[in-house]
Every structure is written in structure tokens, then in C-alpha cells.
């Protein structure tokens, strides 16, 4: 269901798996661009090597080490961390630019940190 969330359009979807691949039926509307994006995500096609935001370098960090200004890759898009707060022990609730709901980081993951910031620490 991450592919559906990535297009940012709420609709009810039904996936049926057929021998030739997944079939999707939904109620709602999609632009041609979003429909093509969804088809690529469902088929596993497309460019899987997402380009990092310009001027950043990848860093493996845990939830307690993430900073405001870092970029997190979710559903094929980079989101900038605008705010963060403690969720539970060793996890953080992140407010991300362009994502309507907060996202909880519970385990270490690769983030993209501005290169000027990383070189100074």
C-alpha cells in the first residue's frame, strides 16, 4: 500500500493477483502522471536508484541521532525533517515537509544530511 500513499491521493483500492501480475481497481480519480507512477511502483519497475537531494551525503543514523534538516526517503520521495520529538524509548516522531501526517522512526536507517553540516561534526 506504500505505492498508493506515495501518490498522495486518497482512494479505496483493491488489488487482485492474477498470473500475469497484479490488477488494481479503485474508486476515485487519478491523473495520468499518478496512474503511470502507481503502475511503475506496483510492477517494481522504474528507476530504483533514487537520486539524493543535491548537496547531501548519506549517513546511517538511529532515531536518536536524526536532525532537523535531514532528508528521509519514504515511498520513493525525499522528505525534509522539519520538526521531531520523542515518541517512545529510542524512537522519534518526525514532521516531514510535504507529508500530511507525522512519521515515526523506530530503527536505524539511511538519511541524507546536508554535506556542509556533516563535515563540521
Image (cartoon, rainbow, N blue to C red):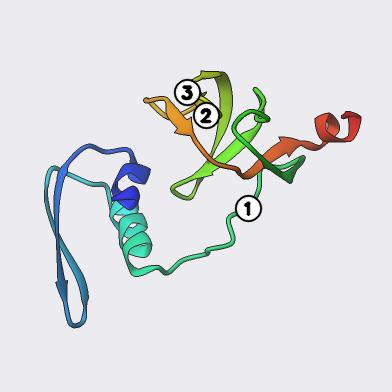
Q: CA distance from mark 1 to mark 2?
A: 26 Å
Which is more toward the observer, 64 or 3? 64
Q: Secondary structure at mark 2?
A: loop
Q: Nearer the viewer, mark 1 or mark 2?
A: 2
Q: Secondary structure at mark 3?
A: loop
Task: Give how far across and how far down residue 81 sits, in percent.
Answer: 58, 26
Query: Residue at position x 65%, y 22% from top?
Result: 68
Residue pointed to by mark 3: 88
Residue pointed to by mark 2: 91
Quadrant (top left, top right, bottom left, bottom right) of the C terminus: top right
Q: Is residue 81 above or below residue 19?
A: above
Query: Residue at position x 63%, y 37% from top?
Result: 62
Instruction: Tell me the number on the disc at residue 114.
Output: none
Q: Neighbour class for label 1 at 10 Å: few (<14), some, many (≥20)?
A: few
Please identify the quarter of the rendering in which residue 17 is found.
bottom left
Residue pointed to by mark 1: 51
Q: Is residue 119 left or right of residue 83?
A: right
Q: Secondary structure at mark 1?
A: loop
Choose the circle earlier in sequence order: 3 or 1.
1
Q: CA distance from mark 2 to mark 3?
A: 5 Å
Task: Give how far across and how far down residue 30 sits, in percent.
Answer: 23, 46
Q: Is residue 55 above or below residue 21?
A: above
Task: Give how far across and how far down residue 89 sits, in percent.
Answer: 52, 25
Amino acid at each position: 500500500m506504500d505505492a498508493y500513499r506515495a501518490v498522495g491521493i486518497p482512494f479505496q483500492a483493491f488489488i487482485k493477483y492474477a498470473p500475469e501480475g497484479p490488477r488494481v481497481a479503485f474508486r476515485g480519480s487519478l491523473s495520468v502522471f499518478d496512474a503511470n507512477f502507481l503502475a511503475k511502483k506496483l510492477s517494481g519497475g522504474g528507476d530504483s536508484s533514487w537520486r539524493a537531494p543535491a548537496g547531501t551525503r548519506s549517513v546511517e543514523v538511529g532515531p536518536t541521532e536524526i536532525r532537523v534538516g535531514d532528508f528521509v526517503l519514504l515511498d520513493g520521495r525525499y522528505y525534509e525533517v522539519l520538526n521531531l520529538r520523542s515518541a517512545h524509548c529510542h524512537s522519534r516522531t518526525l514532521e516531514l515537509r510535504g507529508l500530511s501526517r507525522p512519521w515515526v522512526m523506530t530503527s536505524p536507517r539511511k538519511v541524507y544530511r546536508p554535506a556542509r553540516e556533516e563535515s563540521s561534526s
